[in-house]
Structures are given as structure tokens and as C-alpha cells.
Amino acid sequence: MYKALILCKAYSDGKKVGSDGIYTAAALSRLGISTSVSSKIDENFSETIREMLIKNGIDDSFVSADEEECFAFSPEDFDVIFITGRFVIENENCFNFAKKLCAECRKLEIPVVFDPGSDCGKDGFNVIEEIAVHSEVFVPSAKDAAVLFGESEPEKIAELFRSYGGNKIVVTLGKAGAFYKSNVESGTTPTFRAEKVVDLTGAGDAFAAGLISGIVEKIPLGEAVVRANACGCCAIQSEGFSFPDYQELREYMLTHRFVVEGCKDY
């Protein structure tokens, strides 16, 4: 079984758990990937967060109220690592750790997927850019990338990113799908047809999980993006955070067609 590690910032109000990576971990677990989370949490809400993780089959061994302790893992124990923007902009310690981890993973040939999220803005540009160019795959939304790079066209965003020394990039385009580029392939992958749209909650988490699962299986980047789009489309057809398992995803991809001009249902 493949193993994934998510580095994120988890938080809770005592009732609900929020995070830029926790639900990506839940979606990965549903796809049959053994998933662990590394996060510093508020000890007042530790029980709520751990309950959510365990309920979703996620390993909480690296979750701690101690900022140093939550980093106590060996990267070689994992097949892929996912880092979120909120994690790296949390503090200088997290940024330095993420940068060092990216360098170590590159030597070990362990892919690092980095999603900057939507809260960094221009103020976090230097931090985000540094981690982005050291990661294996950078996954900004078109809106985030426009803030970070000052470009609105996905092709121009990709060219600028790669001119900085970046490797692979996937720019998410909402209902229009996603644009991707690497050394050997590039293109725009449309989304899938949605029978109904119930709730957009968790679509981004599902997309990330589908992409990560494809990367860890070492399928071509374009095929991983197709899988990511399918995961996201599955997620919006149910209430709340609802993610497909591997068999459900496979059946959905076999029975649904692409929507070239974007999913018109939302």
C-alpha cells in the first residue's frame, strides 16, 4: 500500500475541524492510500481533531501541540508528501523545515506536491515561491497564481514558474478543468459531466487527492490531472465532505464523459 504524508495547519472550534489539508488526507484515505498527517494543533481542541482523523482512517502519530515534535518523521517512510501553503507561512520554523524537506525528498526521489492555498497573497510570495520551485509538483488555482505571478493565462503562468526553476505545475481552473505542464507534456484537461451539483465543499480537497494518488502511482501528469478532475466532480454531487473510494472513482471515469467547455451545472 502506498503511503502519503500531509503537512498542514489543522484547527477546530471544538465542534468542527478545519484545515487546508485534513480533508485532502481523508480523500486520500478513501482512495486506499495509507495517509498520515503532520500538524501542530491547539491542545484545547486536540481531542476533536484526533477523533476526526481516526474516524477517516488517518494516522495521527505526527500531530502534536509541540511544534517540534510534529516533525518527528522520516521522509523515506513515505511515497509522496503533500505540503500546504498555510503550513509554510505559519512561521519561520515551518518554512525552513519545508524547504529542507523538499531538498531531502528530491535526493530520495520522493515527490513533493505543494498547494499554496488562497490565504498567502502577495505578502507570502517569497515563501510560497521558494517552496514551489523546490517541490516536484506545484498546484495553484488560477486565482492564486494570478496573485503570485501577476499573470492570468495558465500557459504564461507555467512559463514564468518554470523560468524560476520550477518543475511540474498544475493550475486549477474550476469548472473548466486544469492546465498542466512538465518537461515532457502540457495541456488543458476538461472536467467531467456532473449529474447534479449538491455542494462544492471539498471539491479542492478531492482534486488534490486524485492528483496525489496519480503521482504516487507514477502515471503521466496529464492522466493524474484527469483523475483529479474526476475526484473533484464526484465530490460536488454529495452533501458536505464526501469523497469516492477507488472503485467508485474508476466506475465514474468509465461511465462519464468530459465537458470540454466546462461543467455547466455550476
Image (cartoon, grey):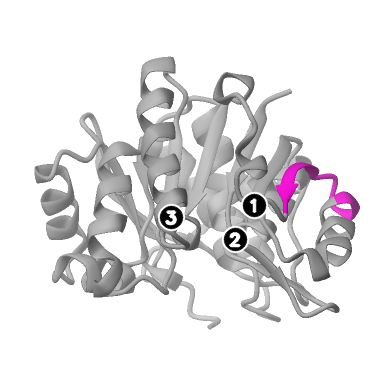
- As shown in the figure, which amino acid type bears the numbered disc 2? Lys
Q: Which image quarter: residue 76?
A: top right
Q: Residue 27: percent from the left, percent from the top? A: 70, 52
Label 3 belongs to which residue? 88
Instruction: Report the side of 159 relative to 42 (left or right).
Output: left
- As shown in the figure, which amino acid type bears the numbered disc 3? Val
Q: Name which residue lies at 42% across and 74% down.
A: 119
Q: Name which residue lies at 58% across and 55% down.
A: 8
Can residue 183 be seen here? The reply is yes
Q: Residue 84: percent from the left, percent from the top? A: 49, 55
Residue 39 is labelled as 1
The span shown in magenta is: 54-64
Q: Give yes or no for contact between labels 2 and 1 (Cβ–Cβ under 8 Å).
A: yes
Considering only vertical position in the picture, is 106 above or below 16?
Answer: above
Can residue 255 be seen here? The reply is no
57 inside magenta stretch? yes
Q: Which image quarter: residue 51?
A: bottom right
> Dividing the image into 4 quarters, which one contains the N terminus?
top right
Q: Name which residue lies at 64% across and 30% down.
A: 73
Foreground of the two, 262 or 186: 186
Foreground of the two, 165 or 255: 165
Instruction: Tell me the element at label 1.
Output: strand
Q: Earlier in the sequence, mark 1 or mark 3?
A: 1
Considering only vertical position in the picture, is 152 above or below 3?
Answer: below
Foreground of the two, 21 or 143: 21
